[in-house]
Image (cartoon, rainbow, N blue to C red):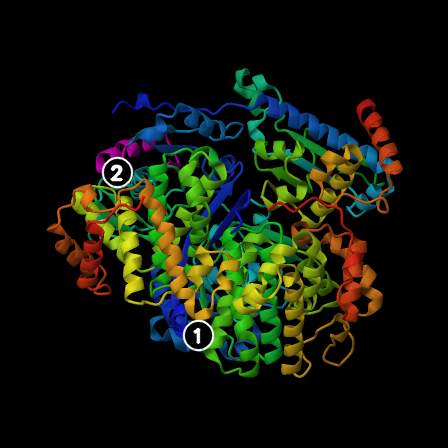
Amino acid sequence: MNINKYPEIHPGKKLFKRVYVAIMLWTVGKAIQVAAKVDKEVKEELAKLPDNFTLRMMVAPEKAFPLFFYAKTLPAFVVDKGLLFYGIQMILHKDKEGKIKYLGADPKGKKIDLNIVFKNIEAAWMVLSFQESTATAYMHDRFVVEGDLVHSLTFVRVLDIVEIFLLPKIIAKLAVKRYPKWAEMSPLRKFVKRVVIYIRAYTF
Amino acid sequence: MLLPGFYDFCCRVRIVSGQNALEKIPAMLKKMKAHTPLVVTDKGVVGAGLVDVVRDAVGKELEIVNVFDNVPVDSDYKIVDEVAKIYRQKNCDSIIAIGGGSVIDTAKGANIVASLGGETLLDYEGFSAVKRKLNPLVVIPTTAGTGSEMTLVAVIADPDRKIKMLFVSYFILPDLAVLDPRMTKTLPDFLTASTAMDAMTHACEAYYCLEKNPLSDSFAMRAIKIISENLLKVVKNPADMEGRLALANASTMAGVAFSNSMVGLVHNLGHTIGAICHVPHGTAMSILLPYGMEYNMHRCGEIIGEILLPLAGPEVYAQTNKKERPEKVVELIRKMNNDLYEATGGRHSRYLNEITDKNGAQVVPESLLPVIAQATMQDGARMANPEECLPADAMLVLEHAWQGKPLDRSKVNKGGTKVKY
Amino acid sequence: MKMHSSYDYEFLNYPKIISGKCSLENIPAELAGYDAQKPLVIVRKSLGKNGALIKKFIRAFADSMVIIGAIYDEVEDYAGISRAREAALLFKDRGCDSLIALGSGAAVDLAKAVNVLVSEKADNFSAYYEEKSISGILKPLIVVPAGLANGREASNNLIIDNREIKSDFLYPDVMVIDHRVAAGCSAADVAESAAIAFAQAFHSFVGNSGNSMVAALAHPALSYLSQYLERGMKKPQNKEASVALVNASVMASIAYANAKPGITNLLAEELARATGISSGIFMGILLPAVIDFLVKDKIKISDEFLLAAGSLDAYAAVAANERGQKGLETAKKLVGVFSRVLPVSLNELKVQKYILAEIARDAAQKSEGFFPAVDCAEILEASWEKTLTK
């Protein structure tokens, strides 16, 4: 048998989805940081997290996503020494005073308390492009949680509120279980917060 | 039958059931190349003489010498480590867990440490730490209700950090579950009632919550049918061994269903009430089940209506108008609770304000309801419920369940799109 | 059915089932759960020629750490030792740690066989045909069923060089059902796979070994067959129908692994052995005759069959004493669909009439006396010549 007839296959990359997911994670991180400052409900929810708490949302497997797409062409020691960091991630930190800060995408030197991991890029794509709501994605095992499950519930609730702020009703309805009625959240609050969060997330 | 857009299903536990199921254990262990089991159990089980029942049943083929009977009601990782240590000291090669949820979880945890090496369970925290087949684990449930012989989760507390650690892996699943009515024979009537209603809740919630799938539906349907046909019979006649075996089967089927399809509001509220007021799990479940159905009725009424078929039989199902079926289901569950209340002489509670402890004091004071409602946000079961449930919504349900009046459905917040399974 | 029998049993449903949208993308995570990241993929030749499908399959592994050791696409309708050795060599040469079977039928048999060779470090199967049993856990095996099935996809046996090996270690670890792979085989293949699934589910349900666990597995299989068979045969490209039918086939094959063999399956396997034609076609021919036989002898089947094969409302609308009969009628109607694309009589397949008696005898013997040879012969006789009812 000529075994060269059956070559080894290195499956490729999904560049567009990588870029999209990375941008969305960045936006979500920034938006939560701003929302925690300007909205009372988000602030109250996040107060349930312990102080000095680091939360990470990422796409698995970490090593499949070197920061630079050309990492493979670099000498091995650069990659091994950890001079590059890996992964499509979003890290949020709650400090001692209870302030929420978006810490970028590099987990190096940080102790992660809660890790929310999308099983693959396709799962992250479906959630972040609102084809699957957070609850549906959880039901479909699209992501797993490392750490205390209770805190991930808080995070999911915050995510829901922020999505209601940021997205037009027609899309937000796909992303959350129940879109709030007037009595639960007034359109004025929604609109003002939407403008404020967008401006501050993209400028600071 | 509904085809969900996506689902996954796994229940790789071998099940042996029958009036003489215990006798088959030695042969099964031999097949798994195990000869020296460590029995893990608690004082209650030993006190009820159940370990002796097992010992007699396995006879001379398998000698049971190593018994650890110190599992407390709320087990923690220290107990797990202790069990693993004994396992190694005595050169055991398998575990037989005899008991309820706490014993089974302890055995699952101990099996991780004993099989993979190391000193403590803490080394194996995190969702992907267990990556290979563990040593043989046999589970003999003694309460027909929890279904934890079928779940791939072990919940084990860490008292130092005050958290509950979750160990999730397909490798944690037991290799063998043995269903034998001799193990539930001595269960008092009110416990038979509440554990069976616990299984009923697993099955019903598995049937209408978000992660429903064809296989969990099929198992849930059968569990509901068996419980509604047998429960009252067994409560009235505790010596009915065939009925007890049927209930044990129903509990396992419900376990298969809910471990693959998750549970919702009823468990969300039930867990929280259990944690704050120490209400037994089964009691909270049976009280809250009708309310959970009513709360979700506007989202998935049709699916709840389908439960009428296994619950009441085809004749009632055919006679009931399609629109009235979900309400009929709720009505029948309430009636079932009522019948059990009468059959057990009032020891099976119907409402939250009826629950009393040994001294007759009320267990759930009305003043605590707002605290419970807030705390429901901290329980994982809220994710799988079809309708969103915020503290205000939980409060609405709790108030009704406390007073014992049907839920006023006009007050439920609505506004979601159609549920997609 | 007496209550006693339905709770006295032993049951194992080993494979994990993943079905639906983006299932293929879950494979890397499943492999990682077994600490594996370099699978050998074994593909049915007919699927392997479909470049677009293979491309889609590989695409599902993009952005993961998985490297595909090789795609071995030499499997035809038959799994033999020489192919198994070739693939095992490839497995070792590339340092693979797991197996994926893409496509149903022989590809799965071969993948199981390769798994035995590489995990047990064996060179042939002669010892396993005799007494030797498989000693322990094999390498992780993921099956992605598609195309013509043989009913052993999710089951605990394999057939290589026409001989069977059975062991609970042969259950695949994960079944992945995705419309990108499942949709698009020919109507005849759909019908043949469905005939096997129906025979397996039907006999798991009505056979006396039927316990409530097996029934719970066979129930959704029958449900999907009755809901989606027509649509799946008319439009094999239909995503929903193809996924549902593959689901049915997987569930039926697990249920059947836990049940006693059914008369249809025994006869069809004997016929297949004698003629070299695949057993699914024979099941399509035999099923109407088997059902007629049950009707004629007034053999009582479980009421729940009607519930599974019909809808809840249809079941409830029928009076209790007529449910068994009505169930058989529903079954008859359902299996009638096969005749649109499959042969309807043994005569049509040029099966010699004189071998029928021998086949009936062999099948009766295999059933350990459960089905008398007279019954087997009667069913074969009835299937030999039939007028077309297209």
As rendered, which of C377 and A192 lies closer to the eye? C377
In which chain is the residue bearing label 1? B
Label 2 to label 1, Cα distance in Å?
46 Å
Q: Residue at x 83, y 68 (%)?
A: B366
| For residue C282, side relative to residue A138 (left or right) | left
**Image coords of residue B93 (percent x, y):** 42, 60
Magenta stretch holds residue B89:
no
| Amino acid identity at mark 1 | Val
List the residue tagged with mark 2: C79
| Amino acid identity at mark 2 | Ala
Residue B54: which numbered mark, if any?
A: 1
Q: Is residue A60 above or below residue B215?
A: above
Answer whether residue C150 is visible to the viewer in this image: no
Answer whether residue B396 is visible to the viewer in this image: yes
Which residues fall within the magenta stretch?
Answer: C76-103
**Residue A31 sits in quarter:** top right
**Image coords of residue C222 (percent x, y):** 42, 53
In which chain is the residue bearing label 2? C
Q: Is residue B382 above or below residue C118?
A: below
